[in-house]
Amino acid sequence: MLKNTPSIIAIVAALGLVGLTIAPVVRPAADLNIWHVSTMVLAWVVVLATSLATRDHELDEDAFEDPPEIPQPDRRIETAPIRELPATQPLPPGSASLLDFARELHGTLESDRLRLLIARRLPVLLGVRDVWIVARFGTRQQMIVPSHLTGGPLVTEELREWSTYPMKADGRTVGIMGVAAKPGGFNERDHRLIKLTASFIAQALLTVDTFETLRETSLVDGLTGCATRVEGLRRFEAELRRADRSESTLAVIMLDLDHFKIVNDHFGHKAGDAVLTAIGETLLTTLRASDVRSRWGGEEFLLVLPDSNAEQAQRASENLRQRIANTPVEIGQRVISVTASIGLTLSRPRENDIQQLIGRADTALYEAKRRGRNRVAFVPSGGHADISAAEPSIQGPVRGWNGPERRDATRQDRRLVPSPGRRASDSMLTGPRRDR
């Protein structure tokens, strides 16, 4: 009711104004005056202003009122059925076993364990009995076959059909996998399973080969094939502990090539590398498999002979000296022969000081050099050096080399500067006139 009051007042005022307007019409004209006309005009202005104000007020109130609810028709929303997307390449049968096999492959970083895993699991995974793998890494070749095939040849007089699959990893072909064909042949899913398996095996073989190459690089000297200095010391410590437990002795040998600097200076470092490679092969073929061969630095080698007494160690050292002296190295049209000075010592019972053993072998080495090189010197655990009576079989370090080394007087004497492959104590032990 209160909300409509302004409208009612405006209507009443409009009716009164209409009455005031009609009255002069029915009354005589003499009764009209300026005041009466002004009152009617003012009344009309008031009525119009009131009407406009009332209209604006009603519009403002309507803006805050809730809009009327529009009845909605009863409609049910229908959703389209969800369709499963078809797999473009459905997984072949045995996918769960294949994934388990792949996890086992990539969790193995040892070559022997990996080959054993492949030989045992691969025939079961593929559902075949006869399968083989041939992989090649550089010049090395690996062949993996199940255990039941190791006793008999793969190639027999019987006519057999094999399906071969390339083994690729990282864009390169690692090897080939051969699978004996089934009586009914392989279907498309069988081919896909074998191809996936071949790719997993190829990646695992490549990973293991890379890992072993890196490990070998850190343990083996690439030029001579001997152990690196760090690895040689580690194996030396292990052999010394074993000798302590078994109460046995071991021999320690320091071997140094005589006048090796002449080879590098007059024939080039390529010739020097060829000589070091030949020395490494001589050490490999002359010593036992259980002996430790390590490149100590430059042209010097540290050798450890486990389970050796004084007589055995001297005989092995002399044999090694003669083999080196009688093994010339051919480089193009040149033939180079080098000799070696050898220092030998023997461990005492319960001795575990490696540096003391190396020091005695070093003393023996420099004693052999002082007596004319190309000799074996033996320093026992507590005595003086014993020089072998064997005379050098080859005089001079290089066949065809005439005269001493020519040296520029203005050039710094490199014999007093220890090289990266030489111990810092060499310059103090050799003196200014020593020539390595």
Image: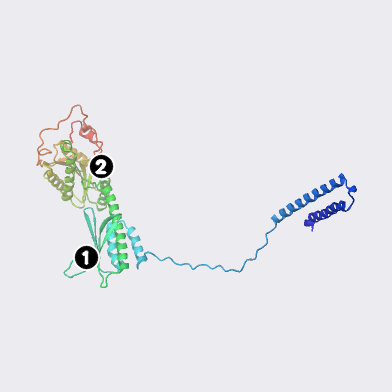
Mark 2 is surrounded, within 10 Å at the Cα level, by few (under 14), some (14 to 19) or many (20 or more) other residues, namely few
**Residue 279, position as x, y percentages in the image:** 17, 45
- Vertically, is 119 above or below 341? below
**Residue 232, position as x, y percentages in the image:** 25, 47
**Residue type marked 1:** Thr
For this rendering, which residue is in front, 242 or 50? Answer: 50
Contact? badges 1 and 2 (CB < 8 Å): no
**Residue type marked 2:** Gln
Report the residue that reaches farthest toward the bottom. 183
The reply to whether residue 107 is visible in this rendering is: no
Report the residue that reaches farthest toward the front. 29
Between the C-alphas of marks 1 and 2, the distance is: 50 Å
Q: Which residue is at 87% across, 51% downward?
A: 24
Based on the displayed image, in which of its 4 quarters is residue 145 positioned?
bottom left
Q: In this figure, which residue is indicated by the disc labeled 2?
A: 356
> Which quadrant does the C terminus fall into?
top left
Is residue 263 shown left or right of residue 43?
A: left
Q: Which residue is at 70% across, 57% downward?
A: 65
Image mark count: 2
- SS category of the residue bearing label 2: helix
**Residue 331, position as x, y percentages in the image:** 13, 43
For this rendering, which residue is in front, 105 or 229? Answer: 105
Mark 1 is surrounded, within 10 Å at the Cα level, by few (under 14), some (14 to 19) or many (20 or more) other residues, namely few
The disc at residue 142 is: none
Is residue 25 shown left or right of residue 197?
A: right
- SS category of the residue bearing label 1: helix
For this rendering, which residue is in front, 72 or 409? Answer: 72
Q: In this figure, which residue is indicated by the disc labeled 1?
A: 150
Based on the displayed image, in which of its 4 quarters is residue 356 positioned?
top left
**Residue 296, position as x, y percentages in the image:** 23, 43
